[in-house]
Amino acid sequence: MRARRPPNPSKSPAATRSILSRLEAQHPGATTELHFTNAYELLVATILSAQCTDARVNQVTPAVFKHYPDARALAGADLRDLERLVQPTGFFRAKSRSLVGMATEVVERHGEEIPARMEDLIELPGVGRKTANVVLGHALGVPGLPVDRHVLRVANRIGIARSDDPEVVEAQLCRALPRARWTRASDTLILHGRRICKPKPRCDQCAARTACDHWKREWGSAPRAAGGSKRR
């Protein structure tokens, strides 16, 4: 049986680009909040960020980078020592194994350089498409569109994507946007999801609300009080 194709987004590519322009204007300068100076540091930080806040990761990584300044040093890390350093990020045993495994692969297969191809990055332990796209887009100059829970929620609510599969949403957004906009679009949607379009959205603060499917369903045709809330 052929796999069922996900439904198309409700927005056209042109509408998607317009909506992203509104959100980019609302969140100028949106970028990753992880601290790094090179691709190796960003890859480590992104692996640690799974199920953890960027702020907490930024508290932990200075000590990690001091002890393990490059992939070769990290590949030779004692797991127990590394676990103690990354414990505050949660799931520290699994993350430590992934970090050492990733670093070992980088040393042995990539000459100690973080590879700049998606195909190579996702072969590294602990690295999926989201992590790879973060590193590609922010540290290696290769357009990438990471889809995390914020991008998934915001894109589906607005109607610029339609799927609960991150890879499908990534593909839908990438088809609608020029490559040069991919990374900034992801950063914008992430920031919008953190600040405005939370699980309980603050629609009255959204610059794109009049184009949003969720807003139209919930508020668009209902009488509104002066503050923008539906009368009950």
Image (spheres, rainbow, N blue to C red):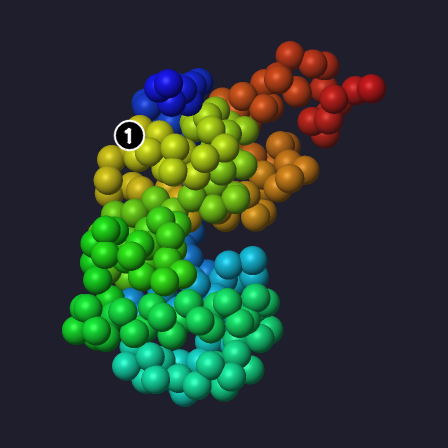
Task: Report x, y in % for residue 177.
Answer: 29, 33
User: Where on the picture, by quarter, is residue 3?
Assistant: top left
174 with respect to 85 (left or right): left
Name the residue beneath numbered marker 1. Answer: 175
Q: Residue at x 40, y 20 (%)?
A: 4
Q: Residue at x 40, y 81 (%)?
A: 65
Quick one: quadrant of the N terminus? top left
Quadrant into which the C terminus falls: top right
Residue 157 visible to the viewer: yes
Is 168 rendered above or below residue 188?
above
Q: Examine the image and state in which quarter residue 12 appears.
A: top left
Q: What amino acid type is highlighted by mark number 1?
A: Arg
Q: Tell me what residue is drawn at x 28 percent, y 81 percent.
A: 72
Q: Residue at x 60, y 73 (%)?
A: 88
Q: Residue furthest left?
A: 111
Q: Position of residue 163 (x, y in %)?
A: 47, 29
Left or right: 190, with 214 as reference point: left
Residue 36 in sight from this viewpoint: no
189 is higher (above) or lower (below) than 139: above
Q: Position of residue 45 (x, y in %)?
A: 43, 67
Residue ranking furthest to the right: 232
Most extreme residue toward the front is 1
- How many numbered marks appear? 1
Q: Nearer the viewer, residue 163 or 228?
A: 163
Judging depth in this view, the residue of 43 and 187 nearest the camera is: 43
As helix, strand or loop, the secondary structure at mark 1 comes to: helix
Pinpoint residue 191: horizontal percent, then vertical percent.
50, 48
